[in-house]
Image: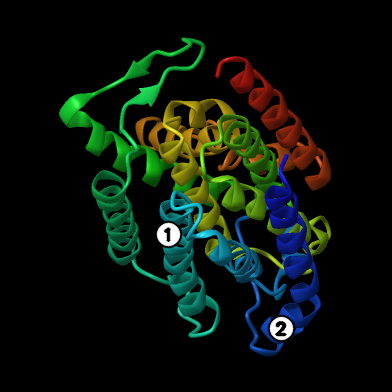
Amino acid sequence: MSKVNVWAVLVSFALSALAGPVAIPFLRRLKCGQTVRDDGPATHLKKSGTPTMGGLLILFSVVVTCLPFLGSYPKVAPVLFLTVGFGVVGFLDDYIKVVCKRSMGLNPVQKFGGQLLVTAVFAYYLLHYTDVSLAMRIPFQAGRYLDLGVWNLPFLFFIVLGTANGTNFTDGLDGLAGSVTVIVAVFFSVVAIGGHCGIEPVTCAVVGALLGFLLFNVHPASVFMGDTGSLALGGFVAGCGYVLQMPLFIAIVGIVYLAEVLSVILQVTYFKLSGGRRLFRMAPIHHHFELCGWSETRITALFAVITALMCLAALAGY
């Protein structure tokens, strides 16, 4: 691991850790408090008022760390753009909800439209300003790639939007999204460094930023990342997957994101088809485990361990 990558981790961690004690009281003064759902687990009611939009700490640390590397590591740019772009969409949603006191935030059309626009710019940049192919490395098939031809672009939109929203669903417990994604970021860092892929500064910066953020986000959390952070992290994971030609690996390393999305889809579908019955006690699935009596820390630890094991499996299949 080169000095560049070590410094990227350390600088980003330091920025995140040092910014926390400044930013959290500021967010509290702005009354950027989380509103807890009445129909959620009763244990979450005490979290009402905890500052949110803490994802700004992550974005600040990653952007400041990566800017000096853009000239010598051009492939960092599309990953950083997708991360920040989705973070901006999440920030607008958070800001409208917690500062402007409009509980809905961005309406579904605005939120999805913003995500589509960011994804379209990312795809255009990838196709016209990089040598990255949309052909995808096939897990456990060394040297083999899947090329969908005209369907490559629609598939890109599906993967990017699905990953971002899967990460968003995962952000429901103290430290959960951060713990899972820091492991995924380590996986991408190992692949990028080992293959000299040119995105190492941003993957390492995300590792450092999340480690610093988790100092304030583990249970009991003193700040939540909000959609600002969760959507940004989803953009990061999808961006890394595509620049490394590994979007198919996201289903492996991001198994938790996938499970969270599928649990919501299955819950809604079953509820409609069964006339009001529920498949899970509550969705996303981490809330189901909560209502079964599991503690937040136990669920977070389990999901992190599963992610770590799946990342090891993905490395074996690289």
Q: Quarter-wise, where is residue 255 in the image? A: top right
Q: Position of residue 254 (x, y in %)?
A: 56, 34
Q: Looking at this view, is 38 or 44 the one in front?
A: 44
Q: Residue at x 45, y 46 (%)?
A: 239
**Of circles 2 and 1, which is in front?**
1
Question: Which amino acid type is shown beneath numbered disc 1?
Answer: Phe
Spatial CA span between label 2 and label 1: 28 Å
Q: Position of residue 197 (x, y in %)?
A: 51, 37
Asked if labels 1 and 2 touch by Cβ distance under 8 angstroms, the answer is no
Q: Position of residue 173 (x, y in %)?
A: 70, 52
Q: Residues within 10 Å of mark 2 (few under 14, many from 20)?
A: some
Local SS, label 1? helix
Q: Residue at x 44, y 56 (%)?
A: 77
Local SS, label 2? helix
Q: Looking at this view, is 51 or 161 the one in front?
A: 161
Question: Which amino acid type is shown beneath numbered disc 2?
Answer: Arg
Report the residue that reaches farthest toward the top.
Answer: 141
* In the image, residue 282 above or below residue 191: below
Residue 56 in view in this figure = yes
Q: Looking at this view, is 281 or 315 the one in front?
A: 315
- Find disc 2 in the rendering and name its residue: 28
Going by the image, does 157 lie left or right of 194? left
Which circle marks residue 81 in the picture?
1
